[in-house]
Image: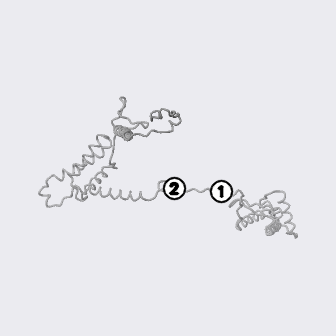
């Protein structure tokens, strides 16, 4: 039997057998596949870098951001007022404050001020103020005129008769005002460092719940004495000049007071005394009232100082 005949006599392979067997790639095809993957990765990286560079360029070129989107050019109908973009780098409280700032900035001796340099710098600042706010520049112009006057007086030659006499320095008044202003400014700064209410600290508020049970104030002995003297004074006004002997019982008056208090919750102190009975009856009635208070059968209360005194039955615990 020939080898070719044997190869032709073998049955063909099924589809499942063909799918399970992978044909090996040649070395040339494997190298080509690796090169293709590297090129695709380089292309993806270059695209990402280009997109990032475009975003950075757009962000730099943008004038502003409106609703999160970069604004590349101004709208045609946008109106910006002339005084909308004003920037004040240094704010001064007045001409003296500006002069003091210029002197300290240039390290000038305040007792020997070079008027030429100071006046030149001051006038430059005043010119900037006049372009924006003419009303604010008015008081600065007054100080500028004073500086120019001092500078002119220093440039004028002195007369021979004035050389022997020591003349006053034209800068003396300005130096005095600057020193006083500096002292006041430092004092104001020291006062501002003191803690202030509602700026550096707040006042705490604490809510304290009060008891709902009323607490009656205690009756002082002086108040009871004054009430007793008032009752005695009224009793003496209605006394009768009768000589009689009457036996008065303290227990009987104590019983009468208790009966009187059972019919009402509070009874005023003066209403418990029978003025018509005279001083002896009033005295016995008062002694009976004291005995009842001593035995804690009654309570003597007062709503507030100098208020009327009331008497009531004591509440005994059940």
Residue 5 is at least partly visible in this image: yes
Closest to the observer: 61 or 263? 61
From the image, which quarter does the C terminus lie in? bottom right
Task: Indicate the position of residue 95 as horizontal and vertical percent values.
Answer: 30, 49
Task: Indicate the position of residue 313 as horizontal and vertical percent values.
Answer: 81, 62
Residue 226, quarter of picture: bottom right
Secondary structure under badge 2?
loop
Residue 105, quarter of picture: bottom left
**Left or right, residue 308 beside residue 129:** right
Q: Residue at x 39, y 36 (%)?
A: 70
What number is the disc on residue 209? 1
Task: Indicate the position of residue 254 as horizontal and vertical percent values.
Answer: 84, 66
Closest to the observer: 301 or 94? 94
Callout 2 crowding tier (Cα within 10 Å): few <14, some 14–19, many ≥20? few
**Residue 9, above or below 90:** above
Q: Residue at x 79, y 61 (%)?
A: 312
Secondary structure under badge 1?
loop
Closest to the observer: 99 or 284? 99
Dot 1 or dot 2: first in sequence order is 2
User: Which residue in the protein does label 2 denote?
Assistant: 202
Residue 84 is at least partly visible in this image: no
Q: Pointer 1 and pointer 2: residues touching (CB < 8 Å)?
A: no
Task: Indicate the position of residue 5 as horizontal and vertical percent values.
Answer: 47, 33
Q: How many marks?
A: 2
Q: Which residue is drawn at 30% across and 58% down?
A: 179
């Amino acid at each position: 039997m020939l080898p070719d005949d044997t190869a032709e006599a073998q049955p063909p392979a099924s589809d499942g057998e063909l799918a399970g067997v992978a044909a090996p790639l040649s070395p040339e095809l494997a190298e080509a596949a690796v090169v293709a993957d590297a090129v695709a990765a380089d292309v993806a990286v270059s695209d990402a870098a280009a997109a990032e560079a475009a975003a950075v360029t757009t962000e730099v070129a943008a004038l502003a951001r409106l609703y999160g989107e970069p604004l590349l050019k101004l709208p045609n109908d946008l109106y910006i007022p002339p005084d909308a973009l004003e920037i004040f780098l240094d704010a001064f409280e007045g001409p003296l404050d500006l002069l003091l700032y210029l002197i300290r900035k240039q390290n000038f001796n305040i007792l020997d001020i070079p008027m030429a340099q100071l006046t030149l710098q001051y006038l430059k600042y005043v010119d900037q103020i006049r372009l924006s706010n003419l009303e604010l520049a008015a008081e600065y112009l007054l100080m500028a005129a004073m500086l120019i006057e001092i500078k002119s007086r220093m440039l004028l030659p002195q007369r021979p008769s004035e050389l022997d006499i020591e003349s006053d320095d034209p800068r003396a008044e300005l130096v005095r005002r600057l020193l006083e202003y500096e002292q006041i400014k430092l004092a104001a700064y020291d006062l501002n460092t003191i803690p202030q209410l509602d700026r550096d600290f707040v006042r705490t508020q604490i809510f304290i719940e009060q008891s709902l049970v009323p607490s009656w104030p205690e009756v002082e002995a002086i108040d009871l004495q004054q009430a007793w003297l008032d009752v005695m004074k009224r009793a003496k006004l209605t006394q009768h000049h009768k000589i009689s002997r009457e036996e008065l019982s303290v227990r009987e008056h104590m019983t009468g007071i208790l009966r009187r208090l059972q019919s009402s919750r509070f009874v005023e102190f003066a209403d418990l005394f029978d003025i018509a009975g005279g001083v002896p009856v009033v005295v016995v009635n008062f002694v009976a009232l004291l005995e009842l208070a001593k035995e804690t059968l009654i309570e003597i209360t007062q709503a507030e100082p100098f208020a009327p005194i009331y008497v009531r039955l004591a509440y005994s615990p059940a």
